[in-house]
Image: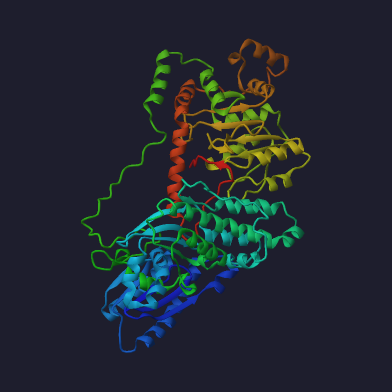
Amino acid sequence: MILAVESSCDESALALFDPGKGMVGEWVHTQIQQHQPFGGVVPELASREHLQNFPILLREVVACLGDHRPDKIVVTMGPGLAGCLALGIALAKALAVYWHIPLYGGNHLRGHAWSPFIPLHTAAPQAFEDELARLLPHLGLIVSGGNTVLFSIDTDRSFRILAETVDDAAGEALDKGAKLLGMPYPGGPLIEQRARGGNEDAFAFPRAFPEAAAAKFSFSGLKTSLRYTLEKLSDTELDARMSDLCASYQEAVVDALARKVHQIARRKPLRWRSLGLSGGVSNNRVLRARFAQLSDKLHLPLLTARPAHTGDNAAMMAFAGWVDAQGIQADGPEHPLTIQPGLNLLSPQSTQSPHDKKAIVTETMPVYPVRRPEVLSAAARWLETGAWARLEGSPETEVALREFHGGGEVWFVVSGTAALEAILLGHEIGPGDEVITTPYTWGATVSAILAIGAIPVFADIDRMTGLLDPASVEACITAKTRAILAVHLFGHACDAPALRTLADKHGLVLLEDGSQAHGAKINGARVGRFGHSAAFSCMGLKPLAGTEGGYAIFSDPGVAERAYLYGKHPRGLLPERARHLGEAGLLDSLQLGWRACPVSAELVRAALPFLEQENNARRQNAQLLRSLIADIPGVTLPAELPGAEGVYHC
């Protein structure tokens, strides 16, 4: 008999499983009511609840066992909340010592993966092995609050991940969508209730990665789309259309899941012998109905977990501890059992000897920026010319940047901060003028406004993206407002099209700070050309890096000319510009030394051809990192706007 202990999140659970008979007993204490006032699981509160409730559940187990004791214990070691996992392991270790029985660590995700097979065992324990062999290879989907994973179980019971979410899980999308709609935690089931009778086609919510070649899910953009939809609805409209909203939102989640499973299943239609659905979200009746249709279309039997085994439960851990020898890890002096909050579906593989495992090779992180020979040689060639006193930057660099951004007047200057000052002064923004910007940015954005005597006004940010919220910007506009300074932060493109529409509506100037976002795109167009002018930094840690430097892009040549007059000393100007300076009466006024070091300009020009390649590498790294940390409870990853493609600067 196997005793299982589950404490990965907010359920304290124990279960007894007899391989010859089935489930002997299951005991679960849920904490939903304790966490509801906070809108989500509070880790410290969850740990305290485990500590209080496990002794109560354990008395029930002991009473069920009578004079017997289990043959072994299986405890969840991950993934989950660290404090909660630690309490479960501490209990399991104490019981293993008391009863003198072996202890094993189990994988919570693999418990979900095997849970649809529990009814099969319950129906005929003695025939289970033959029935299981008939149903493998198995194509399964785990859909829970923190996980969305499509996987296979092969004939040797080994696992393979076929697709998983790159950001939020489907359950998170439903819960957070419900929160936006004003529903309490957990909101997923409430969305299902309100969706009944609603029109699932009423709102066109996006489906990420609809193409068959993309083996991944994404739901962060869906939440962002819901938020923007809600901002356009009045309270009266929202009340009237709540059922349609919920139905359309739910349909977007269900359709994305079913479509991707169908796409991947069709790649090898003769390989699969069964289809599975598990995890908390699998209780959604619309999702279950869609998978029933899918199983008919694929001619595969559908296995679904019992509702009692879809959440955090110990029964699935006990069953997986018996059926999945590859998925459990023995506790022992050399390899003591410890918590593994970030455990993924493929770990551990206990049938593999430690001596068979490949050694982990650690390498020093590469120096950034990448020291490409082409870039270094460009600087060396310029130094060899001996023209060190040249006052201008690099006209060739400005031409290359103009081509990269698709037009505009480009001026390479000494720094990104200087570029910000240049675009502000070029648009004749000065003392007393208000510039609306974001409070969530690097200090140079604000210091450039203050340096010219203007007044920064802080609008709010979008909670999902961390970027400037157009609705909040409009609320900040006054008679003194002259400009909006939008920031593409961390390489993520903010909603520049919406901000440009807002600026044009109110007769304002839209400026872009793209210092961390060289090459980021919105609907295929690079940032820097949505506003009237833009500023970029090229200091050594930026995506497009020189030793220092920056550049400004002006849509209006007249604005560029005014910036030149402020930013170049008379001796650095061409004769016609010097005459213009004198005629403008500015010869003895503000003169700022913004001219750039030519070496930095040459480095930027040499690095520009490699920018898109390095941006793609950043995107791939970001997707990998998202997949590795997406399962950690309590971690919410930043979302990208629909149609945006960031460069993930950090």
Locate the N terminus by quadrant.
bottom left
Q: Is residue 385 above or below residue 140?
A: above
Residue occupying the far top of the picture:
575
Q: Is 94 left, or right, of 202 in this rendering?
A: left
Q: In this picture, is 247 found above or below 17?
A: above
Please tell me which residue is depicted at 42% across the width and 64% down the height of the picture.
Answer: 82
How is the protein colored in the picture?
rainbow
* Number of marks drawn: 0
Q: Quadrant of residue 299?
A: bottom left
- In the rendered image, residue 416, in percent from the top left (x then y), is placed at 55, 31
Q: Position of residue 279 (x, y in %)?
A: 47, 66
The location of residue 477, given as percent across then percent down, is 74, 43
* Left or right, residue 433 beside residue 27: right
Q: In the image, 474: left or right of 176?
A: right
Q: Residue at x 75, y 56 (%)?
A: 234
The residue lying toward the viewer, choosing from 634 and 589, is 634
Image quadrant where residue 154 sits: bottom left
- For the question of whether residue 322 can be seen, the reply is no
Judging depth in this view, the residue of 624 and 593 nearest the camera is 624
Name, please, the residue furthest toward the left: 355
Picture coordinates of residue 164, whole percent (x, y)? 45, 54
Outermost residue, right side:
479
Decide: is 131 above or below 627. Answer: below
Q: Is residue 308 visible?
A: yes
Residue sitting at x 53%, y 37%: 516
Q: Nearer the viewer, residue 264 or 433?
A: 264
